[in-house]
Amino acid sequence: MVTPAKTVPETMPHRERTLDPWLLSVTVIWGLNAVANKVVLQAMGPAGILVFRYLGCALVLTVASLAWSPRMPRGTAKPWGVMLLVGLWVSAQQLLFIYALDWTTASEASLIISAAPIFTAVIGAALGMELISGKNWAGILTAAGGVALIVLGGGKLSAEMPTRVQGDLVMVVSALLYGSGMVFLKRIMDRYGAMRVMSWAFLFGSLVVVPAGAAQVIGADWARFDATLWGALIYSAFIAGGYGFIVWYRTIARTSAARTAVYQYLVPVVSLLGAAALLGERLTALQLGGAAVVLVGLVMARSRVRTPAMAEAPPDLPAK
C-alpha cells in the first residue's frame, strides 16, 4: 500500500525505530508469498487458493478490527454499498493476481506487481491528490521501462512456459487495479480506519471469490497435500494475509511513508531470492537488468511525493 509522503526529522524517535523489525518481518513474509502460492498451485487451481486466502484474511482482520479499531460513533451511517464495490474491486485484483501467478514465474510476477505504486502516483496526480516532480516522473518512466525489459527479456523462457507473456500482461492489469484502488480507498480508510475497511473488503469480496473458486477447491488433488502444501496454504492465508495486513496497517500509521517505502522496495528482492532458492527460477541477464531498473525507478518515483497541503506548509516543518 502507498501512503502520502511527509517531511520528518532525520532522527526518528526510539518508539518508531522499534517498528523496524515488524516491518522487516512483513517484507520477508510478503516476499515469499508468491513462492508459497506457486507451491500450492501444483495441486489446486488459482481461484481455489484464493478461497482459503480470503476466508483466512476475513477471519483474522475481522477479529483484529473488532479488537483494535476505535468504536464508530452512534448513528454513523455504514457505507455498505461503497464497501460492496470495494470488495468487488479488491477481489477482481486478487483473482487477476493469482491467475497471472499461475501463468508466469514467481520472480516476474513479484517484480511486475511491485510497480503498483507507480499507478497510485499517476492517478493521485491526475486527481490532484499528489504533486509529482520531474524526478518522480523520471522514476515512473524508468520503472515502466524496467517492467518492459522483464517481459521482453524472458523470451527464452516462453518455450518452457507458453503462458508467460500472458501472465505478465495480466499481472500488469492486476498492478493497475491494486495501485488505483489505493487512491480510491484512501478517503474511506481515513474515515473508517484501514483495518476495518480491509476486513469489510475481504468479507464482501468473499461473496465473489468463494463461488468462483468452490469448484477448484472440490476438485483439488487433495491426495498430494502433504505437510509442505498445507503449510504453504496456511502461510498464504493466515501469515502473509492476516498477520501481514495487521502488522502493516498498525505500524504504518506510527511512522513515515519514506521509512515504510524502504521495506516495500525489498519485497521483490526477497521474492527473487526465494524463487531462486526454493523453486529454482532464474532470470535472464536482461531481466536482471530490468529488475534493477524497476527498483531504481520505484525509489525515484516515490521520492518526496507531496500532497497539495504539503506544498503550502513551511519546508522545514511537517505538513498538517
Image (tube, rainbow, N blue to C red):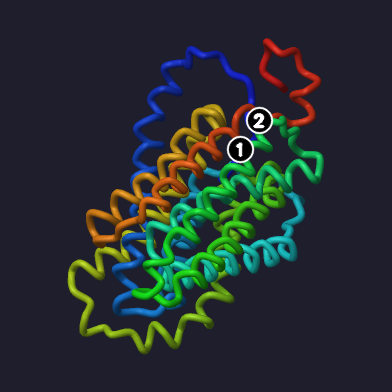
Residue 201, percent across and down? 60, 61
Give left or right: position of 280 versus 150.
Answer: left
Q: Identify which amino acid the numbered label 2 is placed on.
A: Lys
Badge 2 density bin: few <14, some 14–19, many ≥20, Cα 10 Å: some
Regarding residue 148, the answer to whether it shows in the image is yes
Picture quadrant where residue 138 is located: top right
Report the disc number at residue 101. Answer: none
Disc 1: which residue: 139
* Camera-nearest residue between 9 and 274: 274
Looking at this rendering, what residue extends furthest in the left direction?
Answer: 227
How many labels were placed on the picture? 2
Inspect this view and state whether residue 30 appears. no
Q: Nearer the viewer, residue 205 or 92?
A: 92
What residue is disc 2 on?
135
Mark 1 crowd level (few <14, some 14–19, many ≥20, 10 Å Cα)? many
> x and y percent of residue 310 in the render?
74, 24
Q: Is residue 9 left or right of residue 306?
A: left
- Quarter holding the C terminus? top right
Residue that appears at 36% across and 89% down: 219
* Residue 124 to residue 98: above or below: above
